[in-house]
Amino acid sequence: MVTRREFIRDTALAAAGMAVGIRAFANEPKPLNYNENMEYRRLGKTGLMISAIALGGHWKRLIAGSGWERDSSGVAELDQNRHDVVSRCIDSGINLIDACSGGEVLTYAKALKGRRDKMYLSYSWYERESRFEDWRSAGKLLEGFNQGLKEAGLEYVDIWRISAMMQGENTDADVEAIIQAYDKAHAQGKARFLGISSHSRDWLKHVIVKYPQFSIILTPYTAASKELPEDSLFDATRKLNIGVLGIKPFSSGSLFKDGAGAGGVHTAGDDELARLALRYILSNGAITAPIPGLISIHQVDNAVRAIKERRELDVQELARLDSAAGEMMASLPQEYQWLREWEWV
């Protein structure tokens, strides 16, 4: 367990490392959960070295809940699955989990019990954050944050990444309240770095340009996404040294023949598509890590295998991924039609 004193020390060291550049890591300890078969990338201004594939919080189409809920049915099986998957991630060199709801925070806090120091935790209890009017003041945000830590049995989080309104309708006053709440949590040794998520490229760009307190953003980047040749969101993230965690790399499983890549008659083909998508996304150096919601040890192993494969796709591989991505976008469920807006980023 990291103590408050170690928390403050390590945060200062990370900031110092960021200030002097990547050479600062030459004499520093290896990245958390270092594995020679994993690639590590700097998470923007935080200075943290993050595995090039991280673990997204959703467990869709697994056992209990839809991926952000923790209902009463199948919880024991869910907890065992998440414990086993997290264990495989640790052994494989993956070192960050993103949890974005109360159910996910509670589940992953339980999975990390006794080994909290093995994973960076990106935390959002979105039900008590800026998506909802009642939780937009600094006081309410801090109240919800402290309540979440207590319920989950957590002393601190590495990244408090607020879930903003999906289409970026939050005002500058809302953002300034977020910063006020974070400043207090940070001073108390409870939140190391500040991040934010939204489905609006323009709003995210506005926030990181105006408010240097943010170090990380979470934004969609799928197997069908491409970087705009001009005025890309990534122009701003590169200039401002912002870490980027990419959500929905498989478009909520729409990339796969078996729906979620959960295993079935198309497993081999789905595994290949998953690796092609991860290799393609990682070829954009502006993205620190995609964060797929891996639901089995098999999927962890397959994702890690993508790291060891050649990064650039050849002509045949590109054609296969383009074809699958086209089918993916044509078959998006109604609740994910908004991913069409993320073809160009």
Image: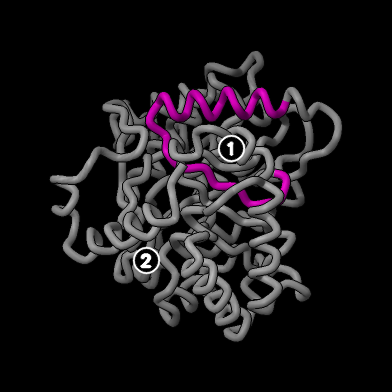
Q: Is 58 displayed left or right of 242 in the figure?
A: right
Left or right: residue 331 compared with residue 202: right
Measured from the top left, where is residue 119 in percent x and y? 46, 40
x, y (%) of residue 170? 64, 77
**Residue 169 appears in which quarter of the rendering?**
bottom right
Name above or below for residue 330 compared with residue 265.
below
Crowd class of label 2 (few under 14; some 14 to 19; many from 20; radius 10 Å): many
Q: Is residue 97 magenta?
A: yes
How busy is the neighbourhood of tag 1: few (under 14 within 10 Å), some, or many (20 plus)?
many
Q: Nearer the viewer, residue 291 or 47?
A: 47
Q: Secondary structure at mark 2?
A: helix
Q: Quadrant of residue 261?
A: top right
Q: In the rendered structure, which segment of residues is drawn in magenta?
A: 78-103
Q: Which mark is residue 293?
A: 1
Residue at 68%, 66% (x, y): give it: 129
Q: Position of residue 182 (x, y in %)?
A: 53, 70
Q: Marks 1 and 2: in contact by CB < 8 Å?
A: no
Q: Is residue 99 above or below residue 88?
A: below
Query: Mark 2 or 1 closer to N-term?
Result: 2
Residue at point 27% right, 58% down? 13
Could you tell me the amino acid type at mark 1? Answer: Gly
**Residue 57 lies within the magenta run:** no
The residue pinned by badge 2 equals 237
Residue drawn 42% across the image and 24% down it = 91
Residues at marks 2 and 1, CA–CA distance in whole angstroms: 24 Å
Residue 160 in percent (x, y) is at 54, 60
Dot 1: element: loop
Q: Nearer the viewer, residue 149 or 300?
A: 149
Badge 2 amino acid: Thr
Quarter holding residue 340 = bottom right
Residue at the extreme right: 72
Question: Can residue 294 be seen in this snapshot?
Answer: yes
